[in-house]
Image (cartoon, grey):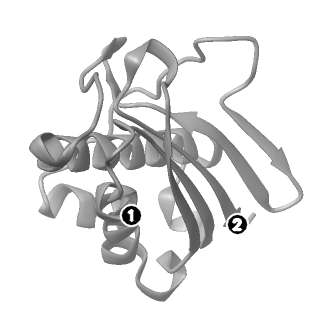
């Protein structure tokens, strides 16, 4: 059902990105998935790079949405079925922004909105959105997640 919703809004899940460092993309403990920070990668390349400012807010929002799509790809890789998601618990959003930029929540909103749209009540989550001086591979955004799944 979730994958049908994705298809209906024109989203095809990519192959989940592989880690850029010494860590695993997802740790499962009990019924919780701790998903490592996902950057806007597609086919092994970072699609959205550079500093976020008021001038490129819409591009940064696309970057955040791509991070959310990569989170979904990681969930699918581990569970085999996005319908096993019982709750999106928390997102942590990081925005590679210039010092004077203060709209980090607006940048991360499209990621949150995608989870609300796909999962309804199960998609409502707590969140943080912060500006940072830099991100891996000069990515515009990075988002990690805690997700509850059923067996």
The picture places residue 17, in percent across and down from the top left corner, at: 47, 23
Q: Quadrant of residue 106?
A: bottom left
The residue that mark 1 highlights is 105
Q: Position of residue 24 (x, y in %)?
A: 73, 24
Q: What is the residue that sits farthest to the right in this orientation?
A: 30
**Residue on which disc 2 sits:** 148
Marks 1 and 2 sit apart, C-alpha to C-alpha, by: 23 Å
Q: Is residue 96 above or below residue 124?
A: above
Closer to us: 133 or 31 = 133
Residue 1 can be seen, yes or no: no
Residue placed most toward the observer, 16 or 144: 144
Secondary structure of the residue carrying tag 1 is helix
Question: Residue placed farthest to the front in the image?
Answer: 100
Which numbered circle lies on residue 143? none
Question: Comparing marks 1 and 2, which lies closer to the viewer?
Answer: 1
In this rendered view, identify the residue nearer to me: 129 or 100.
100
Tell me: 87 left or right of 116: right
- As displayed, is residue 35 above or below residue 123? above
Q: How many marks?
A: 2
- Seen at 17% across and 48% down, the residue is 54
User: Residue 44: percent from the left, percent from the top?
Assistant: 37, 11
Among the 4 quarters of the image, the one containing residue 46: top left
Circle 2 SS class: strand
Say if 107 sits above or below 27 in the image: below
Which residue is depicted at the point 36% across and 46% down?
69
At x 28%, y 23%, the residue is: 50
Whether residue 2 appears in this view of the structure is yes
Quadrant hosting residue 20? top right
């Amino acid at each position: 059902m979730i994958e049908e919703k994705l298809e209906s809004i024109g989203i095809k899940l990519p192959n989940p990105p592989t880690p850029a460092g010494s860590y695993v993309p997802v740790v499962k403990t009990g019924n919780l998935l701790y998903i490592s920070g996902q950057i806007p990668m597609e086919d092994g390349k970072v699609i959205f790079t550079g500093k976020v400012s008021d001038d490129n807010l819409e591009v940064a929002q696309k970057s955040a949405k791509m991070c959310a799509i990569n989170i979904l790809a990681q969930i699918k890789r581990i569970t085999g079925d996005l319908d096993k998601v019982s709750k999106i618990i928390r997102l942590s959003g990081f925005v590679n922004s210039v010092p004077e930029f203060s709209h980090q929540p607006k940048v991360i909103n499209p990621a949150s909105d995608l989870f609300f749209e796909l999962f309804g009540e199960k998609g409502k989550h707590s969140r943080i959105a912060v500006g940072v001086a830099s991100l891996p591979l000069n990515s515009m955004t990075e988002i990690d997640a805690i997700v509850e799944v059923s067996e």
